[in-house]
Amino acid sequence: MHDSSAPLVVFVRSGAVVAALAVTMPSYAQDQSASAADTQVSGNDLLIVTGTRRADRTVSESAVPIDVFSASDLASQAQTDVNAILKNLVPSYNLQRNALFDGSAFVRPPTLRGLPPDETLVLINGKRVHRSALVQVSGGSLAAGAQGADLSQIPSAAVERIEVLRDGAAAQYGSDAIAGVLNFGLKRKDKGLDVTARYGQYYAGDGADLQLSANLGLKLGSNGGFLNVTGEYARSKDTNRAVQRPDAVVLQSQGYAVKQPVTKFGSPDAKSYRFFVNGELPLGDDTLYFFGNYGNSDQVIDFNYRRPVSVTVAAGPSGAPFTFGKSINLFYLDRNADGSWDANGRTWSDATLFPNGFTPRFRSTNVDVSALAGYKGERAGVSYDLSLGYGQNRIKYYLSDTFNPSLGPTSPTSFYDGSLEQRELNANLDLRYPLDIGLASPLNIAGGGEFRTESFLIGAGDAASYAQGIYASQTVRRADGTTFLVTHPVGSNGFPGYGPTSIVDRSRSSYAGYLDLEVDVTKAFTLGGAVRYEHFADFGGTTNVKGTARYAVSEAIAIRGAASTGFRAPTPGQLYLRNLQTAFIGTNPVPVQVATLAANDPAARYYGAVSLKPEKSVNLSAGIVLTPASNFTFTVDYYNIKVTDRIGLTSNFIVTDADRIQLAALGVVDPNSLGVVRYFTNGFATRTQGVDIVASYRAVTAIGRLTTALAVNYNKTRLIDRRTISLGDGRTNVLIDDVRKRDIETLLPQWRGVLTQTLQSGPVDVTARANYYGNFTNNQLASNGGDKRFGSEVSFDLEVGVKVAQRYRIAVGGENLFDNYPDRETRLTFPSTGAPASGFVYPDASPLGVLGGFWYLRASASF
């Protein structure tokens, strides 16, 4: 295990060295330095459009903390996935691997300030982005039950800038804006073609990754209009950081031809292509604008291995022999006249289909489409913006190298498991009028309205993927007349298909109106306020407010603060989803069916579910802005976010035989196949507190233009309330169990830091980055090995590029340059493999990642 203080010492020393170089390196005159800084898209004088309705507000003048990242910030990253880029740029933004977690392995759920992805609002060009169709039923404790936008659908080559508002903004933008707002500004250039090719691979020799992108700018009309088109193609091979499972080691020694390893642990095998278009066409004094996208991705992962026979390992975690049972029970083929099955008749085993066992392969195709058009202009001093946008995301699931055990020998071995679909239609009208009331600035009056419809659909898979065959439950009769019960899972094993009881086609509409005021009372003192009313067809109305203030003590010092209320309405997906999974519970080596249910499902009601209601939040922030020079800025911001009635998934309810009788009486289909039930609930409340520290320094030095940026985040979440329910038979259950509670509080590191240094010296540019991740705790039941604290880590990234003939650029780089890995797993490990039964050596919750170092070459050209 790492010395937990050593990575922090390395990070701090790196910062000290960079700071010393920045201070001591000779620089040219201040005005020259400032001029160079002004050319940076991320400069402090850059106008912002997020968090304010004013047209003249800059980053440094904002009353709330906001970060702006330019296209060059994105282009110097090893990865092109926007999620991975934000993880490197924003310390409070975390992303975990989620290997083997069904759809969450493909649509990875990020967290901002420790809050789930659907508590962060995502905008493109200031307009709301539709959600992913995936409800994160397998996204880990931090995102369990969440349904947010899929940022991987946005190609980084299409993005001119990203504004990250680190403050609650539901009173300005509506539902979801609790942790903050991400606003992606698309490229607007009207001429030229930029093409980029990047190839990379992990130091381990796998994960070959090819990225091709092109961005084309065209003039539209003769009055300043433009059409900007981006295309991106990506192809990445899968990765593996697992060792062979101990049961598979024994099978190999017995002559079974099993794969090495039988289950991969890493990133999916993936390919995708994505397109974005952005345009404007001036029409006299007004402007018609539009943007949209089309994305298509195809990804595949392994599920857990299924053994063909029972296996005994000589030494398990305790040192004693350990037996892995046969994954699928034996089948009895001869039926008696009374409907029972003959114990002495013919039998069948899944080993007939899969003599070496089987590892289901889970595939997802993801199609994402959006289109938005708007009309904006000004009349009599009133600015107006009217827009209509539509977005749709559809995910299809397929499963191969498996079978439906309840169908026995008649089962196919590949399946279409069904689809998830999200559709959204948004109409917006925004108005703005600056009213001179005799203060230091006009009173900016903004208001408007929004109408939205949101739909969630689940489409059925093929019949064999969900069918309950005759072998699902077999009462087997011995020769002496006694009987015993043999059960086999229903549905394609690994991920049962969506059947008739899971089909959903539900919609919801809402409308909203807002008023936003902001004024400079004096040159030093700014006040702002917003109020928004939003009404949902299924929940009624909610009103939220926000107030902001900023006071410049001097030209170099300003203080700022904000207070707001917020909310997040349950999505139709959370209201109506019904999902079945095959899972391994605890140390039981035999999989069971886990049902994730909507709160209105009869089985959920049996276990105490009540109707969902919106989450509510209170967000407080206060900070100081120091600008001792035009090329140096230092900000510190404190935040406090209380979220009540948080929506998530309950802990597991173990289904007993008595429960199955009651569930059958309630009309629940096939209760005998259920092993575990969980459902969506407003089950808990949290308080998140933290501090963001951001510093930037820019100068023109003797060796070139130097930019240094430091971003540090301290974030701590505490669960302050959780519901307990009592069932009719005297059982009680805490809806959010102790393991989930500890995950919410400790699964993310409290400290995270990013130190970035860029140097532009003639045709050569260098970007160096140090990333610090504090320690975190992976929590488990005592029977699963208990909690384990993983130490803090530091990783380094480096890219060196050179321009050739002004038009071409070649770069070489490394991410996690020194091939650092998190601490190894030590709980319940087997002596024969040095790993747990799964073969997974590293915790997939590690913020560092589990894949090690990655090198790449990048070539680009501009025409």
Image (tube, grey):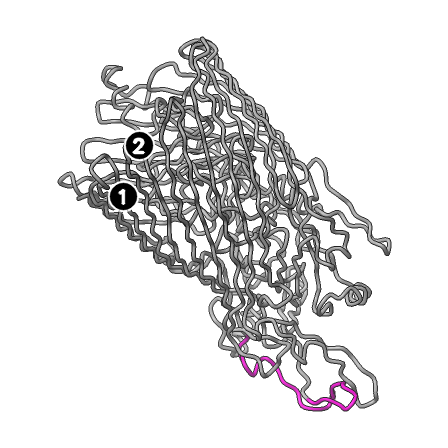
Provide the residue designation for mark 2: 758
Q: Quadrant of the N terminus?
A: top right
How crowded is the residue under tag 1: few (<14 C-alpha within 10 Å), some, or many (20+)?
many
Looking at the picture, which amino acid does disc 2 mark?
Thr
Query: To which residue does mark 1 refer?
Result: 227
Assign the C terminus to one quadrant of the image: top left
Q: Secondary structure at mark 2?
A: strand
Gap between marks 1 and 2 measured at Cα: 31 Å
Look at the magenta stretch and give its main secondary structure. Answer: loop
User: Image quadrant of residue 217?
Assistant: top left
Identify whether 494 is placed above or below 286: below
Foreground residue among 76 and 201: 76
The answer to whether 348 appears left or right of 285 in the picture is right
Q: Is 96 inside the magenta-drawn segment?
A: no
The answer to whether residue 79 shows anywhere in this view is: no
Q: Nearer the viewer, residue 722 or 175?
A: 175
Disc sitting over residue 591 in the figure = none
SS of the residue under disc 1: strand
Q: Residues within 10 Å of mark 2 (few under 14, many from 20)?
A: many
Q: Position of residue 414 (x, y in %)?
A: 50, 74
Q: Quick check: can you spot residue 492?
A: yes
Q: Position of residue 824 (x, y in %)?
A: 53, 50
Q: Earlier in the sequence, mark 1 or mark 2?
A: 1
Splitting the image into 4 quarters, where does residue 797 fall? top left
Q: Is residue 753 left or right of residue 726?
A: left
Disc nearest the viewer among 1 and 2: 1
- Magenta range is 334-357
Marks counted in the figure total 2
Question: With respect to residue 746, does 53 lie above or below?
Answer: above
* Residue 342 lies in the magenta stretch: yes
